Image (tube, rainbow, N blue to C red):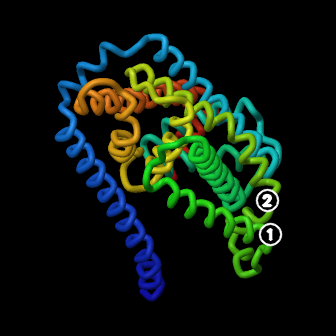
Amino acid sequence: ADAGHRGARGRVPRARLGRGRRLRKLAAKAVQLALLGFLAWKVPFAEVARQLPDARGGWLALAGLSLVAIYLCDALATWSTFSRLGGPVPLGGMLVARGASYLLASLTYVAGQGALLYFVRRANGLTTAKAGAIILVIAAANLMLLMALAGLGLALSVETPPLLPLLLAVGLAGTVVYAVLLVVRPKALARLGVVSGLFDAGLAGQAWATLVRLPHVLALMAYSFAMLRAFSVEVPVVEALFRLPVIYVIAFLPISVQGLGTSQAAMLPLFSPFAAGPQTVREAAVLASSLSAFALMTAFQSVLGLICLRTPLGKLLKAQGAAA
């Protein structure tokens, strides 16, 4: 009876953790529905629908090529980072694992990350903590690149979004603190498995991960830029350089599902000035571009994921993702 009592006590934190996760998901969905409702109220759907047939085919074709580039650059950067910081990883396997993780992550983030962690652990015997640390290094590389590109755009552009300097200041402060921790390596933090993995990577490892991640971020920006131009949102390259990273950071925040709703709401004031016509038409063009970009990327990653999941490795990843 005592053992059963101890087991029940041990299950309480897990139950609370599960409830907390469900509450966060419900909150994210509530925010998403509220933002989508606001967008539907602000921009007439009929006007958005009228924009779709007028999309320019040449820019859509470029967007399609950019999607392929996003996948290849992402997989290559992930493979390079894991191979350098954790040991050799087969490139072919990484191409399959990364493609499969896109589809699994669209179901749940944990499933996508679980599949990727399983692959690298199976490939070179990395511990979960070490592999998780490398994923954090990759995430930090993404954020650093976005901040750097936004800062470059801020230096070159005359007009800036009001919150951009503040966001960059906060990001820069966080980067400095992170860099100091990598150099000092406090013993109290080094005892933690994931943090120890970050310290093992060090500044050199983080710099490498950031460098090899640059083509992926540029391909992502090329995709967004092409989709804006496809719907006649004539944003100059320099303006897109700092405005798009702001949108990406907002989309990555865990306040809505897959960034849908938050990114569209943020894009209206940042990009509608570059479209033609009355305000309603300009906002409809931006919204049509953003929703189409989301739909096209989701379709591409779903098809890619289904193809990858049909491979022998993909079937193992699917099983692991379902168990995560």
Amino acid tagged 2: Leu
User: Could you say which is closer to the camera, residue 88 or residue 171?
Assistant: 171
- How packed mark 2 is, by other alpha carbons closer than 10 Å (few <14, some 14-19, many 20 or more), is some
> Around disc 1, counting alpha carbons within 10 Å, would you say few (fewer than 14), some (14 to 19), or many (20 or more)?
few
Q: What secondary structure is found at the residue carrying circle 2?
A: helix
On the rendered structure, is 297 left or right of 67? left
Check whether the beta carbons of the residues at disc 1 and disc 2 lie within 8 A of each other. yes
Q: Is residue 37 above or below residue 310?
A: below
Q: How many numbered marks, from 0 up? A: 2
| Residue 284 point in image, percent of width and height | 27, 29
Mark 1 residue element: helix
Disc 2 designates what residue?
A: 203
Residue sitting at x 75%, y 45%:
81
In the rendered view of the protein, which quadrant contains the N terminus? bottom left
| Up-down relation of residue 213 to residue 128 (above or below) | above
Residue 3 spot, x, y in % from top left: 48, 84
> Type of residue at label 1?
Val
Compared to 138, does 215 lie above or below? above
Relative to residue 42, is residue 212 drawn left or right? right
Q: Earlier in the sequence, mark 1 or mark 2?
A: 1
Q: Check disc 1 and report the residue beneath it.
A: 183
Q: Which residue is pictured at 42% across the width and 19% down the height?
A: 230
